[in-house]
Image (tube, rainbow, N blue to C red):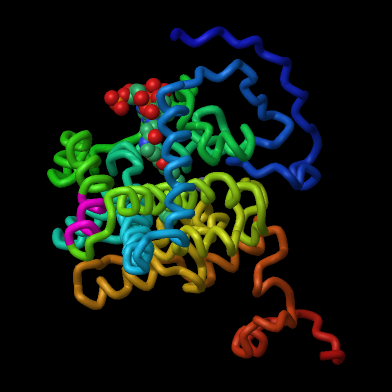
Amino acid sequence: MPPRPREKQPLPSLPTGPLEECDDITTDKIPEEFYQPDDRPLEIVWRNVVVMGTIHCIALYGLYSVFASANLITTLYAFVLYHLGAFGITGGAHRLWSHRAYKAKWPLKLILVLCQTLAHQNSVIEWARDHRVHHKFQETDADPHNAKRGFFFSHMGWLLCRKHQEVKEKGKGIDMSDLYAEPLLRLQHKYFHLLMPIGCFVMPTVVPMLFWGETLVNAYCLNILRYVACLHGTWLVNSAAHMFGIKPYDKFISSTENLLVAIFAVGEGWHNYHHTFPWDYKAAEFGKLNWTLAVINLFSKLGWAYDLKTVKPEMVKTRVHRTGDGTHEIWGWGDKDQSPEDYKSAIIYNKSSED
Ligand code: ST9
Ligand code: ZN
Ligand code: ZN
């Protein structure tokens, strides 16, 4: 459907006066009052609504089966697959391929592509394209899951309707040549419609039936439960971690530090840091609750992950000081987390005799 022309509302006049007076304005962010949400009706894709509705019903039955009839080993197996799929998303589609935050040798790339296929969140190339667009145009109409359009839209609603024309227009400008240059990713992208059903649905269902005699219904429903749970774990990063939590690194963006999301999303809940320093392979300042980081570090010991990029602590501190909301753990003189070295080495001008 061709995009309908949109009636433009007059923009509020720009604030005048010296820059210091406009303390909510940074040069690279759109101030709240200048953002005009697109209020055109969404074009719902009913096929996706039906598919998502159906798999959610099956997942609920799977949850019931966990307690009613499934082998304990099938539940443990689903738990392991959740984490493998999650690693394919976080370590692969996200930190390696969307952000190039580290480099990987081919055996690790192969593992990551297999795990990412197990998680079925589209091919790596499609996932990374949407994600790069999200970072570059966050909180605008060009952001595929723009959090300004509400919790449900940013969580899963965006997958149930056609994308905004701006996503496609602005997305064209995103360089994806590095990913198209990788034969493994081209292969996965080209044959995704064959690889995905086998990798995400058939294989995970067949294994419990063949190896420990699980019933087809239990094996299938628990696998769908694992798949749906992993989707929600990921979607929470787009919704909850763009709405609830503190902003120690940049108070001008919507993304937040969210501990619960970090748990479900195996280390991806430190989203205010991540949007501030997207090239950091830790996707967080610290290693707390960061299962993905632990696994990448393990592969780094093997030599399969290398060129791990991170941010100098001084640079983080400078940024915290410039744009943070004041909740950073090292915020403030005398903070319990301020290191004794920092305390001792600080330069204090016009020092009083009080401390
Ligand atoms: C899923 C993805 O769930 C979840 C991603 C979440 C990301 C989270 C990130 C958070 C940080 C990382 C945290 C990880 C945590 C992990 C924790 C794990 C526990 N740029 O898409 P189409 C153009 S997927 C440029 O059909 P429609 C392009 O020309 C779930 N251009 O748009 C394209 O053609 P082609 C399973 C773009 O028609 C054409 O438009 N999958 C861009 O509006 C058409 O593209 C599903 O459910 C762009 N960004 O349809 C499938 N985008 O591709 C759902 C598009 O040939 N998807 N173009 O080049 C769909 O059915 C459709 O995409 C649609 C939109 C209906 C949503
Ligand atoms: Zn985000
Ligand atoms: Zn990212």
> Looking at the image, which residue is at 69% across and 29% down?
34
**Does residue 177 appear in the picture of this structure?**
yes
The residue drawn where x is 48% and y is 24% is 161
Q: Position of residue 164 (x, y in %)?
A: 49, 23
**Which residue occupies 45% across, 68% down?**
290
- Reply above or below: 34 against 297: above
Is the N terminus in the top left, top right, bottom left or bottom right quadrant? top left
Left/right placement of residue 194 relative to residue 89 reads left
- Horizontally, residue 2 falls left or right of residue 99, namely right
In this view, 296 is above or below 340: above
Q: Nearer the viewer, residue 204 or 282?
A: 204
x and y, in percent, of residue 123 in the image: 28, 40
Residue 338, position as x, y percentages in the image: 65, 82
Residue 332 in percent (x, y) is at: 73, 74
Magenta extent: 203-210
Look at the image and tell me in which quarter the C terminus lies: bottom right
Q: Residue at x 55, y 28 (%)?
A: 141
Q: Quadrant of ligand 1?
A: top left
Tell how many labels.
0
Question: Would you say 13 lies left or right of 115 here?
Answer: right
Prevailing secondary structure of the magenta residues: helix
Q: Quadrant of residue 302?
A: bottom left
Regarding residue 166, the answer to whether it shows in the image is: no
30 lies above or below 256: above
